[in-house]
Amino acid sequence: METLIKENIKTYTTDGKVRHKSNDEDINEKIGKILGSKWNEYRKKWDAVNNFEIQTDFPMFLHLDLHQVCNYSCPHCNISHLEELKKQFDGKISEKMDFEKYKRIIDEGSEHGCPSVEPQGTNEPLLIKDFEKYLKYAHEKNFIDIMINTNASALTEKRSKQLLDSGITRLRFSLDAATPETYKKVRVGSIPLEKVHKNIFKFLELKEKGGYKLPVTGVSMCVIRGNEHEQEMFEKFWIDKVDMVSLQAFTPPNYAPENKVLFQSFFPESFKGNRKSETEKKELQEFKCVQPFQRVVIRNDNITACCNTYSNQLSIGHLKDGIYNAWNSDFAKQIREMHLCGRYYENATCKRCVETTDFE
Ligand SMILES: C[S@@+](CC[C@H](N)C(=O)[O-])C[C@H]1O[C@@H](n2cnc3c(N)ncnc32)[C@H](O)[C@@H]1O
Ligand code: SF4
Ligand code: SF4
């Protein structure tokens, strides 16, 4: 049965890289009705940060890579190019972050009233057997916006129940395709799409039957050359089944010269790259990146300014010295100041990122 796309679909983005679409009501208003004033105050402050109206003395968002392991090998993803990945991290990929280290991060965030955490980065979080323990700890320490993405291949009924009881706020299933044929191509090494759908539908059923209001659920597609023709089909299929459909811009994973051509080939046809119009070029010149004002990303004990796959080049500190010190380091302040003035091009990493990402 075909699902009709309603005319009042809401679209929003905070960084220009991910466009979120939801039916009926804004997803944050929806969560606000569930969590009340604490949530609404957090979102007000978050919006002020995103509009460059205020700066905080501690990040509002902790983004943690708990390990660098996945059971899929999606060609557009950094983790599928292990040798390249290792080069970016001194020859090592990270094993699972132990719980004691994780607790120290969450405790520091909690002391500073940090509201949001994503304990997952470029990896598959459900491969961590006791992952729900990590989520629960953040919830107990008063984080109110706890979010994860999963490919849902390991989403058994038992894991679904554990996730529902973990206190997470948002759960997103990354699919990157609307049809089994495309899924197989863009998600190399995957289990069949039908099986993944089954896992997700079971989760949704358990959520509904159990009367859980949270987590809000979403599906996502990273738009690349191989799936761009399925964007509309994807949106139509999911918009009435989950709370949010997200379309994510592709960021080339790294820039080793021998890989440049390969990654260029993943850009969707619609990506204009160097063929941008004069107006778009002007918009680019005025671009300010909000991530260094919102978050820190922690990978391999390194604290960085954004979630870009090569953001280790924007390292602002080491975990042993704490998040507060990294956030308030001279380099972190310098990156923020640079973006505030719209001079992203002064940093080679940001220049490369901004000029090669399909920003809105
Ligand atoms: C990195 S994965 C991590 C979580 C989990 N393994 C999954 O696939 O849901 C989250 C999302 O990032 C997308 N992604 C992977 N490589 C990307 C890239 N180079 N640029 C932008 N998004 C990417 C994936 O397609 C997926 O939708
Ligand atoms: S499933 Fe997620 S982490 Fe794994 S290769 Fe694909 S996009 Fe990357
Ligand atoms: S590399 Fe620079 S422009 Fe790109 S996401 Fe990171 S901070 Fe923003």
Image (spheres, rainbow, N blue to C red):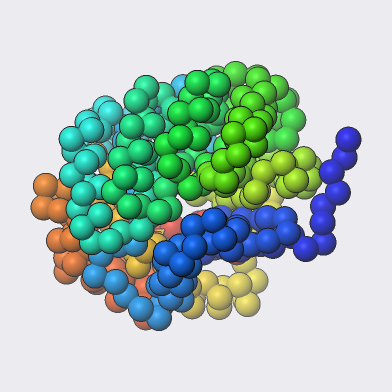
Q: Quadrant of residue 335?
A: bottom left
Q: Residue at x 42, y 64 (%)?
A: 38
- Tell me where residue 149 appears, x and y as whole percent: 49, 39
Q: Which residue is at the far right?
A: 1
- Tell me where residue 229 appears, x and y as whole percent: 76, 43
Determine if residue 35 is in view: yes
The image shows residue 343, relative to residue 276, as above or below, that is below
- Tell me where residue 162 appears, x and y as whole percent: 45, 28
Total labels: the figure holds 0
The image shows residue 113, relative to residue 212, as above or below, that is below
Q: Nearer the viewer, residue 225 or 238?
A: 238
Image quarter hosting the C terminus: bottom right
Q: Residue at x 62, y 76 (%)?
A: 278
- Left or right placement of residue 289 versus residue 276 in this view: left
Q: Quadrant of residue 110?
A: bottom left
- Left or right placement of residue 269 versus residue 287 in this view: right
Q: Nearer the viewer, residue 26 or 31?
A: 31
Q: Residue at x 51, y 28 (%)?
A: 161
The image shows residue 3, relative to residue 94, as above or below, that is below
Determine if residue 74 is in view: no
- Left or right placement of residue 243 versus residue 131 in this view: right
- Tell me where residue 158 appears, x and y as whole percent: 50, 21
Q: Which residue is at the far left?
A: 321
The image shows residue 223, relative to residue 124, as above or below, that is below
Q: Nearer the viewer, residue 349 or 237?
A: 237
Q: Residue at x 32, y 52 (%)?
A: 142
Q: Quadrant of residue 264?
A: top right
Image quarter hosting the N terminus: top right
